[in-house]
Image (cartoon, helix red, strand yellow):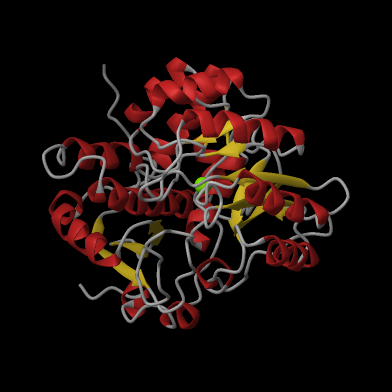
Amino acid sequence: MIKERSQAIAPVRITEIVAAPLFGDSPPGGWSNEITPSDSIHTLIAVHTDAGITGYGSVFTDGRLTESAVAQLAPLLLGENALEPERVSEKLHQNSFWFGRGGTLTHAISGIDIALWDILGKATGLPVCMLVGGRHREKVQPYCSVLMEEPGEMAAVIARYREQGFRAFKIGWGPFGRRDDPRRDEAIVAAALTELPEGGKLFVDAGASDAYWPNGLKWALRTADMLAEHGVGWFEEPLVPDALEDFVTLRKASRLPIAGGEVMTRRQSFLPYLVRGAFDIVQPDVTKVGGLSEQRRIMHMAQDFGVRYVGHGWNTALGLAADLQLATAQPNVDLVEYIGGSAYVDGLLADPFQLDADGMLAIPDTPGLGVTLDPEKVARYSPQAGRLFSQTK
Ligand SMILES: [Mg+2]
């Protein structure tokens, strides 16, 4: 006799999805068409449920695009069981094939997916890490990510964040590689190195996904040599993101690790880069790539290909919280990216992230993402903040 299927946990039905664009203090990105503080490039997501549990996520794209994407996806989500993040997110991917797969819709799915994992964790009383791989470590090193400046200012910026307790740094974008003057580029790197703490780390990000990147493989090979001479830890986005074969050539020739992948979305896009051996370090962005469901599959693929994984969800406190959960869910993750001086990371949580005396970040072990938004703080950057915290339907 077949035993009747029992359901230990009753379904938790999605009742409302809210998108709240953040603006007013958007930090510069080093883009050639620079972001202004009033531009909205990040959006918080809330998924409300009939169980009174709300999950939160984050999307890296213009708030207006996210709002439209959420309106498009809502009919597929309302009434769904929030306790099945992978199935529900895959349903969204499968049904958005014709409407911008890999673009804004995938970015928006990222925030929804993160919120669903937050709900699953809260409903089961487990931190997300326990649901996606386990808990390999209690803390991880955040590297402070800052924009390239001219040499004098560059040294001052590193010194400022070193004083805040960071021991690893990444400098990128801005003037680097933009002036056809390798000596200026080297001077910026050398200036940053003068302010590293004892045993500190420095990484360099060319930011070649910026508009009209002027350099190609020969520049990347020469620059990789220069960075290796200075003991830099990795060279990130040294080529335009689509230059797969040049990445393969560069990685083989370079003495220092080659990193990339932050702009790519969907796990399927990463496969040829891993199969061909384009990266030493892969850096998917959990707030773009499709959320935790997609990110963890890329993380595991990277492990199987012998490629390091470092998350790129640094842009809001919720993106970083998602990165922290994944950073403990695999045996060999040793870093997370932490943007220096962003209100959207440091100024949204009831209990802000804090470095310990060794410059490490504790990985939350409370249910879900393990962080709590402060409604009053969020309201400074989003007029829709109230809807994140109370249902209207
Ligand atoms: Mg980067």
Picture residue at 78% right of the left edge, 64% below the top:
159
Answer above or below: position of 18 versus 288. below
Answer above or below: position of 130 versus 56. above
Answer above or below: position of 200 versus 341. above
The quadrant of the rendering that contains the C terminus is: bottom left
Residue 58: image location, x then y, percent: 40, 58
Say which quarter of the image contains residue 208: top left
Residue 325: image location, x then y, percent: 56, 46
Picture residue at 78% right of the left edge, 62% below the top:
162
Picture residue at 41% right of the left edge, 54% below the top:
119
Residue 13 falls left or right of residue 129:
left
Residue 74: image location, x then y, percent: 17, 56
Q: Please indicate, yes or no, whether residue 175 appears anywhere in the rendered image.
A: yes
Residue 85 falls left or right of residue 97:
right
The quadrant of the rendering that contains the N terminus is: top left
Picture residue at 51% right of the left edge, 28% below the top:
218
Residue 286: image location, x then y, percent: 44, 46
Answer above or below: position of 232 versus 13. above
Q: Please indicate, yes or no, whether residue 369 appears anywhere in the rendered image.
A: no
